[in-house]
Each structure stands twice: as C-alpha cells, then as structure tokens.
C-alpha cells in the first residue's frame, strides 16, 4: 500500500557536487550543491540560487569547476555546504584543502577531490520557476588511483558520495547490479 508524503524533492540519489570558483580578487570559493546533473555529453546544469557567492563568481569569471565529493573528504564537503562564502571570507582556508588553477578555465581545481569537470559558462537560464547555470565541460581530470584498467573512473574505487534528500544523509555509491543498455534487452 502506498502512502502520500506530500511535496518533496523525491529524487535519489543526488550527487554531492563541489563547485569551485575564483572571486574578483582570485580568492577560492567552494560550495556544496546536490541539485546538478549532466544535461548533454559535454554540458552540466546546476540549479542554484543566484544569491550564492559562487553564482556571483561564475557570472564574473565565466568559469567554474565541478568535483565529485568522496568519503575521504566528507567533513570538508559538508562544511562547504554549511558555510557561506558571502559571510565567511576565509571559508576555503578553513577547510585545509589545496587548490590549483586549471590550465583549461579560469577556476580552481580542488586537488583532494577525485574527479573534476572543468567548465566554461555556457548559459544562465532564469525563469519564474528556475535559475540554472549551464556549463560546457572542456575537460575532466581524475586521480589515477580511481581509474579502472581501461582508464575510466571506477566509482567504487572513488567512493563518490550521494545525498539522500529524504533523510539528509550521505551515502557511498555501491555495487554494480546491471549493465546499462543490456539489462533490458530481453524485453526487446
């Protein structure tokens, strides 16, 4: 039997994305955002509130990076979601993490996170119902230890975090239970 739960953001899992930018003075800012998704083979969309410091930085610099948070850095990832760059000038320094400038876009790469997408601002979509930042992915880099034998990211090695909006919890991506574009072939 089903039970009505009311209006909830009922999508699971949600990624734990670390969006990194530089401000006008070259200061690193990082925010934790779960409302983001790949929207094309070379694009990512982020549904954010335009009052975030990160959004202000993206509008000015026209670039950002998006890293996948992992278990090793859960404390810092959560901190980036609790603290606001609008009110905490030393937010990044407090994390103890390391940033290096991307050589592809004008944005920082947070070295500790295992997978990073380097993005140019493609478009901002603003309607009565949404504020979305679309980024063109110009490069993806990853720590070698999270790659499989074919050079692809192995999410079980990377221990990528997922966010559960139902109970506000972080979880790790788990075991593989099927193969995309193969598991349903027998129904064809």
Image (cartoon, helix red, strand yellow):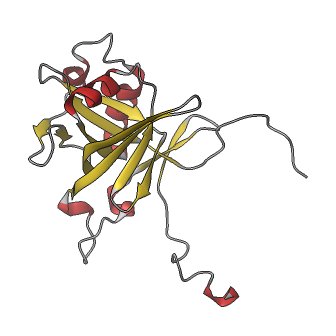
Between 128 and 167, which is closer to the camera in this rendering?
A: 128
Q: Tell me which residue sits at (42%, 54%) in the image.
A: 38
Q: Tell me which residue sits at (59%, 31%) in the image.
A: 129
Q: Is residue 28 above or below residue 149?
A: above
Give x and y (percent) for residue 13.
55, 50
Give x and y (percent) for residue 146.
27, 61
Give x and y (percent) for residue 94.
23, 20
In-image side of 129 versus 33 (left or right): right
Q: Is residue 62 above or below residue 39?
A: above
In-image side of 117 versus 188 (left or right): left
Q: Tell me which residue sits at (54%, 38%) in the image.
A: 169
Give x and y (percent) for residue 151.
23, 72
In-image side of 108 versus 167 (left or right): left
Write down the quadrant of residue 28 in the picture.
Answer: top left
Between 184 and 169, which is closer to the camera in this rendering?
A: 184
Q: Tell me which residue sits at (53%, 33%) in the image.
A: 130
Between 107 and 178, which is closer to the camera in this rendering?
A: 107
């Amino acid at each position: 039997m089903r039970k009505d739960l009311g209006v909830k953001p009922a999508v699971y899992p949600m990624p734990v994305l670390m969006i990194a930018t530089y401000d006008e003075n070259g200061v690193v800012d990082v925010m934790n955002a779960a409302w983001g998704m790949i929207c094309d083979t070379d694009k990512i969309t982020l549904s954010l509130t335009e009052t975030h410091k990160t959004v202000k930085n993206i509008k000015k610099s026209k670039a950002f990076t998006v890293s996948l948070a992992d278990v090793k850095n859960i404390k810092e990832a959560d901190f980036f979601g609790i603290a606001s760059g609008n009110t905490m000038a030393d937010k990044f320094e407090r994390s103890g993490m390391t940033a290096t400038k991307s050589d592809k876009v004008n944005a920082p790469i947070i070295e500790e996170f295992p997978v990073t997408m380097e993005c140019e601002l493609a478009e901002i979509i603003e309607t009565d119902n949404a504020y979305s930042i679309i980024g063109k992915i110009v490069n993806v880099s990853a720590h070698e230890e999270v790659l499989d034998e074919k050079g692809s990211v192995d999410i079980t090695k990377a221990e990528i975090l997922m966010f559960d909006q139902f109970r506000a919890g972080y979880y790790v991506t788990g075991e593989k239970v099927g193969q995309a574009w193969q598991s349903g072939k027998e129904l064809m």
